[in-house]
Image: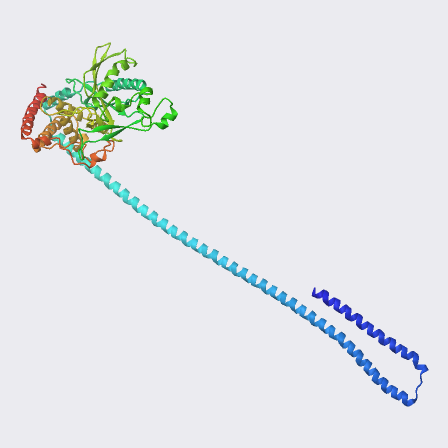
Amino acid sequence: MALVFLLALVRVLSVSVKTDVLMLENVQRREADLQPYMIPPQHVIEQRNVEQSWVDMLGLLFTLVEYWRIWFYVGLILLLFWNMVQSLKMNQRDEGSKEEEEEEVEEVEEVKQVKKEEYEEQVEKKEQEVQEELLEEQEQVELVEQQQQEEQVEQEVQVEQEEEEDEEEEEEEEEEDYHPSKFTEFITRCALEYAQGRATRCHLVEKLMNDLLNTFRFFWSDTFFPVLQTAIGVGSAFEGWSHQELDTVYRLIVPIEAPQGHSFLLELGDEGDVLARNSRIRVELQCMCPIQQQLEDVLCFLHHQEDELSQNQEPSLLQTLCTDSYLDVQKTVTWFTVQVDAVWKATRRAQAYDLKVLPSSRSCNLQLTETSSGEKILVELLFGVQQGNSDIFLTSQNTEGGFTPSTAWPQSCAVAEKKFFQHTARNALHDSTHLSCLTFLACASVQMGFSTYVIKTIVLHLLALIPLKKWSRTNFVSQLLDLLRYLEYCVKEKCLTHFLVGNGNLHNTVVLPEAFQSATPLNLFQHLKEDPAAYFRAQRDFRKLKDRFLRLLIFRH
């Protein structure tokens, strides 16, 4: 816009100057045309010349004045132009300075970025170096640990080898020193023959009973009676020490679970009581509304009226097999016993074996007779509820001595003890005699005042104390004598601790409740401390047992 204004101003000034010049030329031309006709006197002419000179000077001044105006405008234009040029230069300088500043800023930023990258590279290098140093140190530590472990393993191997060599030397020395007489060999052979158990039929019995229980479950699956699980064989027959002169009774525990709409709550007797004899199983009703939505013919015991339930649904477990909300042993056994004969006839083995129910109040005693040979098999079914995920069950077995209420479910360690024998059998030598020792001593203690459970506890303790390789044929008689001496010591000290209660050195194959592991060891001979007469009888019974033991060992009767 400033440039356009300057151009218009220059145009107007140039037109004005041209007009003044033309007017001056016309005046002079007119004067020249009139000059011939006018000849004034000399003095007039001189005077006129003087005046004319003054007029010319005035005209020249006027012309100069007019040209001054032009030069003024020209100067003004030049001034404006110079100002414009200066402003353009200043703008260019500003732009140049800005660009320079931007370039400087960019250069600074580039320098900073380069420095930052260099710093990061240095940091990464340092981190890598530190990591490498750490890895080297870790590798060195691992190498040192590995070397220490290898040295430790080598030392352990050396120690084991030395111990084995020492044991072998001791055994060799013992063998060299020990030269059994023919009489001793004869006694050992006769005792082993006597202690040899009968050929058990455990596998067959388990198969027969599980076929029975599967058929039972099929018929009673849609009811509110207890759900029967797979039977677990326990006792001497399944532990492998049943004697041929004794009537073998195959004892099995049948785990039961609560039916739908019910739950079992275990009440383990008095607080602090381990192996409680008065444990009870309380039955509680559970909501069945979710099941009712899936199965239209099932009604919830908690959210329906009794009249509606009695007309449209079978009674609950609380109404059938319970006494005061507690599961009743006798009612449960009676329910099973009444149905077992009819259920057995529906099994696949009904034609091969005849089943007879023997009277019992707290267990189901069955006699199976093979139709072809007439051989009889005695089976005792105990019902039990598992305590958590452990190997301890609350069973329907009788307690030793005294009356057992029908709602009492004593704790049983039979499954845990069987698992310990199985673990021992897996780790013992193929010709181990620990079961033969147990069988021989159990036969000797019949009607001698000591129960087979006491004898089994004695053997369990010595199995945990004596290495399994010591239970060999060569040491059979000496192991029998060790068992007898241990029993004598326990009677004298009036103390025989339960093998499972308070024993923290058991293998993890046997799962016990925390209360068992942390409990104070339970004394099975506590009554000897409390009753002097019982202690006197125990001493007398041991002397009889010792005599019976020696007769069986020498004369086999």
Could you say which is closer to the camera, residue 382 or residue 126? Answer: 382
- Identify the residue shown where x is 90% and y is 87%: 45
Q: Is residue 505 visible?
A: no
Could you say which is closer to the camera, residue 229 or residue 292? Answer: 292
Q: Position of residue 110 (x, y in %)?
A: 52, 58
Direction bottom: furthest residue: 43
Residue 160: quarter of image: top left
Q: Is residue 100 visible?
A: yes
Numbered-mark total? 0
Direction top: furthest residue: 372
On screen, residue 213 versus residue 103, left or right, reads left
- Quadrant (top left, top right, bottom left, bottom right) of the N terminus: bottom right
- Identify the residue shown where x is 39% and y is 25%: 294
Q: Is residue 439 above or below residue 530?
A: above
Q: Position of residue 155 (x, y in %)?
A: 24, 41
Q: Position of residue 44 (x, y in %)?
A: 90, 88
Q: Position of residue 370 (x, y in %)?
A: 23, 12
- Quadrant (top left, top right, bottom left, bottom right) of the C terminus: top left
Residue 246: quarter of image: top left
